[in-house]
Image (tube, helix red, strand yellow):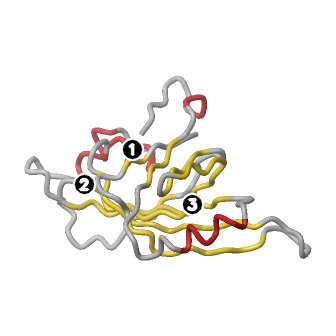
Amino acid sequence: MGINVQFAEYPEVKNVNVRKEGGGDDGPIAVDVTMKGVVSQGRAELISKLTGCIPEQASAFWNPSDESVFVGIEKIEVPTNFDEGQHCKLNGIDYKGIRIRSISFVPVTKGLRLSLTVQIPGIDHNKIGDLAELIKRRTECEIYADPEMFDENDEAA
């Protein structure tokens, strides 16, 4: 299953974690990038995709004035059951084969505050510095899946 996320404004990169995968000294390098931003368009569909509820139920997070009806929610964490092989376009660079490691959201007025961590496996050592420079900055970001990652009945959220 795939997921598409388009932020209403550039999300802030909160953390970049570099680590070695697997055993041995020559294991591939992976980078985890954590970011937070607001999603406004398609928010009910995104909640539906994340939680498994139908979009009409997800719309219950907002009143007719588009204000969040659940004031005080710290965050709602959801399982990351999305297939590997998604894409993350970050600061103009398209990283392929990413995996979403964690995701949580909070309904806010006219949107959804989303916090997620993506894993970029087997990254080129030369690109690690570019990612580290994004910490505490707002940067262009889009997460998307190839169309074949969606079932016939599955809409791209």
Q: Disc 1 residue type?
A: Ser
Marks 2 and 1, how far apart at CA: 14 Å
Q: Nearer the viewer, residue 16 or 125?
A: 125
Position of residue 44 measured from the top left corner of the image (x, y, whole percent):
31, 44
Position of residue 13 measured from the top left corner of the image (x, y, whole percent):
44, 69
In percent of the image, x 32 and y 39: which residue is there?
Answer: 55
Q: Residue furthest front?
A: 126
Marks 3 and 2, how far apart at CA: 21 Å
For disc 2, the marked residue is 111
On residue 118, the disc is: 3
Counting residues from the start of the chain, the first of labels 3 and 2 encountered is 2
For disc 1, the marked residue is 48
Q: Nearer the viewer, residue 56 or 38?
A: 38
Mark 2 falls on what kind of element? strand
- Residues packed near mark 1 inside 10 Å, few (<14), some (14 to 19) or many (20 plus): some
In percent of the image, x 69 and y 66: which residue is there?
Answer: 126
Position of residue 33 measured from the top left corner of the image (x, y, whole percent):
55, 67
